[in-house]
Image: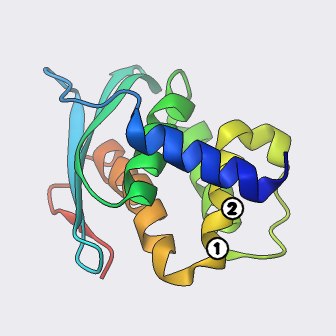
C-alpha cells in the first residue's frame, strides 16, 4: 500500500469512526479551537497523571481532515509526557508542512498518513488545529485557538 492509499484509508476511517469522540467530564484541562476557513470547531479534553496524558478526548465538528486528525491525535498522545507530546507536535507539523521533513515515518505510526495533507496547503490548518488546541489545553490557555 502506498502512502496515498494509506492517507485516504486512514483519513476516511478516522472521520467516519472517530476514536475518543465525546466530552471528558471531569477534565483536568481543555481548550477550544476554531478554523474560520473551513468552519472546523473542536474542544480537546485531557486528564493528566502528573506530566503524562492519561486520557484525551475531543468533540466538535469539522471537515474530514480535521476530525480524522483529532481522532489520530487522541490515540497518539495517551500515555505520553508533555515533553513527548511537544516533540510529537513538532514532528507532525514538519510532516504537514515540509516536503523534505526529516522525520522517521515508523515513529509516527498512523500519524504518518497526515503527510498527504501537505499536498493540499489550504488543508494544513484543518489537520493542525487539534494539535494547537491540545497545546493550549496543556498550557491551560483560556483564549480559544484559531487558525487565523
x, y percentage for residue 105? 82, 48
x, y percentage for residue 26? 14, 20
Question: To which quarter of the image does residue 99 belong?
Answer: bottom right
Task: Decide which of 22, 9 is in the foreground and name it.
Answer: 9
| Quadrant of the frame with the C terminus | bottom left
Residue 142 in the image: above or below residue 59: below
The image's mark for residue 118 is 1
Label 1: few (<14), some (14–19) or many (≥20) C-alpha neighbours in 10 Å: some
Q: How many marks?
A: 2
State the SS at label 2: helix
The residue located at (51%, 38%) in the rendering is: 13
Question: To which quarter of the image does residue 80 belong?
Answer: top right
The residue located at (72%, 42%) in the rendering is: 108
State the SS at label 1: helix
Q: Judge whether residue 81 can be spotted in this image.
A: no
The reply to whether callout 2 and callout 1 are in contact (CB within 8 Å) is yes
x, y percentage for residue 78? 50, 25
The residue located at (56%, 33%) in the rendering is: 76
The image's mark for residue 115 is 2
Amino acid at each position: 500500500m502506498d502512502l496515498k492509499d494509506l492517507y485516504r484509508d486512514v483519513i476516511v476511517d478516522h472521520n467516519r469512526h472517530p476514536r475518543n469522540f465525546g466530552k471528558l467530564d471531569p477534565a483536568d484541562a481543555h481548550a477550544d479551537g476554531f478554523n474560520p476557513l473551513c468552519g472546523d470547531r473542536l474542544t480537546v479534553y485531557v486528564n493528566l497523571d502528573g506530566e503524562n496524558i492519561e486520557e484525551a478526548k475531543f468533540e466538535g465538528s469539522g471537515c474530514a481532515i480535521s476530525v480524522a486528525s483529532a481522532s489520530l491525535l487522541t490515540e497518539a498522545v495517551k500515555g505520553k509526557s508533555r515533553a513527548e507530546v511537544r516533540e510529537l507536535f513538532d514532528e507532525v507539523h514538519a510532516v504537514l508542512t515540509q516536503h523534505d521533513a526529516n522525520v522517521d515515518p515508523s515513529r509516527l505510526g498512523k500519524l504518518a498518513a497526515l503527510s498527504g495533507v501537505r499536498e493540499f496547503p489550504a488543508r494544513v490548518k484543518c489537520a493542525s488545529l487539534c494539535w494547537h488546541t491540545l497545546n493550549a489545553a496543556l498550557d491551560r490557555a483560556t483564549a480559544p485557538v484559531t487558525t487565523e
